[in-house]
Image (cartoon, rainbow, N blue to C red):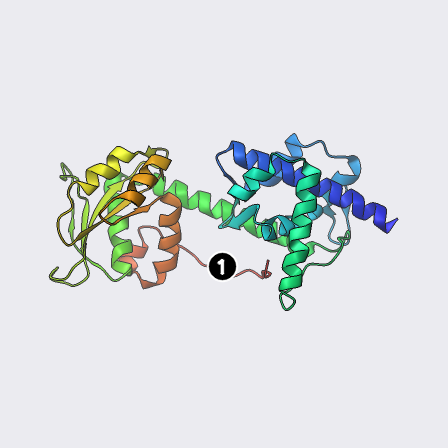
């Protein structure tokens, strides 16, 4: 009986995780954690048993199996969970050419190999039960909270005007230890929005020339990257910050440029703001105020 339940649990995880991987691929490679449960509920054919609450905590069975076996997919390198978002890796994309059952078999095998090579690491239980994955379900709840928080931050930034976002970029640079004597005023900026120095006088190199594009719903193309590279002089490096994203061509142009250029998209900007927040002045913090809350977590 226990074995039958285990088989049903694994079969449930097989179809739900595969469906989510396909959806992440369709969306361009990622999916906010807050979208996972609604997507599965609406798009995967779940049995009555899979939809039942079970165990002391009365969690829905499919969510337990989904989280339990997602660890295998992580260890296999098929998915990555970060900052409230799930990502499908190139290895995960390749798995979509296989059947869901084949993917589960390979993921499970990869998990056990990881476990063999890392005997001192904390492991999940060998088989799930109705009461097993409370911690894992808490994990997805935390991921959903992180995802919601990230969306709130994105919306807050999107509501800023271009000059306010430009000031935020300068604030981040100051928190990183740079000096920002020039922040472009309203009007034509000549292609440079912020200049940052490593010393107060700007006598030392490198000098950082920064282009800022506040386009949260847009993708920056390669032509914008080339335009910034065109204004660099000896001793300069370039920084391009957008509240949106960069196209593959833009990333390739930056990577292959003779001059050094660093591209920071909206997600990375948020991560860096969180990382350096404690080093900001109170006035700079107020541009995007954050509140830190600690949750009990786990090591997965």
Against 71, residue 224 (above or below) is: above
- Side of 128 where 251 appears, left or right: left
Return the x and y of residue 137 as percentages of the image width and height.
65, 51
| 55 and 89: which is toward the camera | 89
Residue at 64 percent of width and 52 percent of height:
110
Q: Name the residue furthest right.
A: 1
- Side of 129 where 34 appears, left or right: left
Q: How many marks?
A: 1
In which quadrant of the rendered view does residue 56 lie?
Answer: bottom right
In which quadrant of the rendered view does residue 186 lie?
Answer: top left
Q: Is residue 65 visible?
A: yes
- Side of 121 where 200 appears, left or right: left
> How dense is the environment of label 1, judged by Cα within 10 Å: few (below 14), some, or many (20 and up)?
few
Residue at 30 percent of width and 60 percent of height:
280
Return the x and y of residue 47 as percentages of the image width and height.
77, 35
> Helix or strand or loop: what does disc 1 sit on?
loop
| 102 and 245: which is toward the camera | 102
Return the x and y of residue 183 as percentages of the image width and height.
17, 48
- Side of 294 where 39 appears, left or right: right
| 226 and 179: which is toward the camera | 226
Residue at 56 percent of width and 38 percent of height:
94
| 267 and 148: which is toward the camera | 267
Return the x and y of residue 124 as percentages of the image width and height.
68, 59
**Quadrant placement of the C terminus:** bottom right
Instruction: Check disc 1 and report the residue beneath it.
Output: 293
Q: Is residue 66 visible?
A: no
Against 95, residue 127 (above or below) is: below
Against 222, residue 133 (above or below) is: below
């Amino acid at each position: 009986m226990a074995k039958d339940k285990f088989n049903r649990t694994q079969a449930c995880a097989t179809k739900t995780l595969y469906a989510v991987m396909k959806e992440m691929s369709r969306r361009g490679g990622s999916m906010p954690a807050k979208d996972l449960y609604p997507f599965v509920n609406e798009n995967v054919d779940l049995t009555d048993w899979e939809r039942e609450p079970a165990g002391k905590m009365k969690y829905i069975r499919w969510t337990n199996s989904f989280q339990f076996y997602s660890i295998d997919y992580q260890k296999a390198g098929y998915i990555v969970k970060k900052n409230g978002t799930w990502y499908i890796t190139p290895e995960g994309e390749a798995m979509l050419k296989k059947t869901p059952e084949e993917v589960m078999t390979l993921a499970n095998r990869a998990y056990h190999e990881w476990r063999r090579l890392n005997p001192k690491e904390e492991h999940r239980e060998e088989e799930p039960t109705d009461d097993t994955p409370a911690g894992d379900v808490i994990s997805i709840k935390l991921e959903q909270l992180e995802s919601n928080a990230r969306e709130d931050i994105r919306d807050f930034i999107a509501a800023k005007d271009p000059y306010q976002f430009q000031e935020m970029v300068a604030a981040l640079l100051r928190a990183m230890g740079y000096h920002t004597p020039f922040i472009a005023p309203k009007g034509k900026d000549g292609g440079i929005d912020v200049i940052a120095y490593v010393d107060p006088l700007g006598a030392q190199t490198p000098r950082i020339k920064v282009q800022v594009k506040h386009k949260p719903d847009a993708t920056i193309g390669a032509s914008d990257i080339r335009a910034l590279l065109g204004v660099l002089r000896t001793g300069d490096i370039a920084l391009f910050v957008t509240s949106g994203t960069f196209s593959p061509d833009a990333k390739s142009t930056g990577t292959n440029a003779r001059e050094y250029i660093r591209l920071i998209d909206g997600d990375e900007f948020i991560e860096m703001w969180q990382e350096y927040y404690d080093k900001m002045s109170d006035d700079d913090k107020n541009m995007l105020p954050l509140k830190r809350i600690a949750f009990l977590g786990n090591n997965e």
